Image: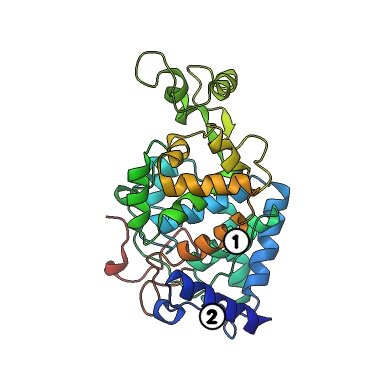
Amino acid sequence: MAIKNLLALVVLLSVLGVSVAQKGLHLKYYKHMCPDVEAIVHRVTVQYVSRQPSLAAALLRLHFHDCFVRGCDGSVLLRSRDNDAEINALPSLSLRGFEVVDAVKSAVEKKCPGVVSCADILALVARDAVSVINGPSWPVPLGRRDGRISRRSEVNLPSPFARIAALKQGFFAKGLNTTDLVVLSGGHTIGISNCGLINKRIYNFTGKGDFDPSMNPSYVRKLKKRCKPNDFKTPVEMDPGSVKKFNSHYFDSVAQKKGLFTSDSTLLDDPETKSYIDRQVATAGSSFPKDFSDSMVKLGFVQILTGEKGEIRKRCAFVKPKTKETLTFV
């Protein structure tokens, strides 16, 4: 089975234009150093997510944030004495799930001290968290190293207020394409936001007491019942009714002009992303699980550190205390 999985991954990555050998990651990277790592990660992740299913979206988002800032190097997990790490940036303030990563890391350290990176643990936790709520699974090649740098000023994530051109530019900069953009947006099917991020969109879009005309009026009325004009905290499901089910319903919502964010609605403005949405709606999401898995594999290769680069942290929130060169927060 291991050989089968490895062959499948090699075929997948060759199709996606990614070489395992070039990138330095391998499915069995820890085979001799920590053979039980995936079992440990799975066990602890299941314990947390089965009790609190909303953690699946939180952990998936945590992995995405990590990869989009300095690459998949675990830098989103670092904390700073001066509150100027990635975790302190405005888009990061609502991140959750750190306790799961810490619990997994602690369990792995007991079995294999100083071996498995926090970056790899986060990649595995995101995969397993989605699978707990019956979402797709995907192969996670391992061997990432942990970064030593985490800067609040470098957090420049795809914005929920962005239009399609800016979103595509952001994804292209990370080696991801338009298909990856629309497919990974499908992860919003389990997402939860808050009224603060949509208040202007539904109450005062152009400063004239109007709502965004790209939104379905019936959806706006429903949102206004939940979010009052001065409400910035009430949680809002990004795909109503699907927050505990990883499925393709998000694309149905977007096609009906019920995308919560501008970044959701604008997917209808591009021929390629709109065509993908229409195809998922017409086929009840027949290809979405595989497409999501493929795009998650690609995401996991973004700007990784391997070999002698980076380090293996003992605690995910702190770099290893070495010399002055390893000071991380500038």
Q: Quadrant of the C terminus?
A: bottom left
At horizontal 48% and vertical 16% (from top left) the residue drawn is 229
The residue that disc 1 covers is: 290
Looking at the rendered structure, the kind of residue marked 1 is Lys
Residue 28 percent location from the top left of the image:
57, 80
Residue 155 appears left or right of 219? left
| Nearer the camera: disc 2 or disc 1 | 1
- Who comes first in sequence, dot 2 or dot 1? 2
The amino acid on which the numbered mark 2 sits, given as a three-letter code, is: Tyr
Q: Residue at x 38, y 50 (%)?
A: 86
* Total residue callouts: 2
Secondary structure found at label 2: loop
User: Dividing the image into 4 quarters, which one contains the N terminus?
Assistant: bottom right
Instruction: Say which element carries label 1.
Output: helix
Q: What is the crowding at mark 2: few (fewer than 14 residues within 10 Å), some, or many (at least 20)?
A: some
Q: Nearer the viewer, residue 62 or 295?
A: 295
Residue 328's disc number: none
Q: Is residue 250 above or below residue 322?
A: above
Residue at 56% x, 23% y is 223
Q: x, y (%) of residue 125?
A: 59, 61
**Residue 57 visible here:** yes
Where residue 164 sits: x, y (%)? 37, 42
Asked whether residue 97 is in view, the answer is: no
Q: CA distance from mark 2 to mark 1?
A: 24 Å
Residue 261 lies, in percent from the top left, at 47, 34
Task: Residue under label 2, please give it.
Answer: 29
Residue in the image at 49% along x and 61% along y:
316
**Residue 232 or residue 166, whichever sits in front:** 166
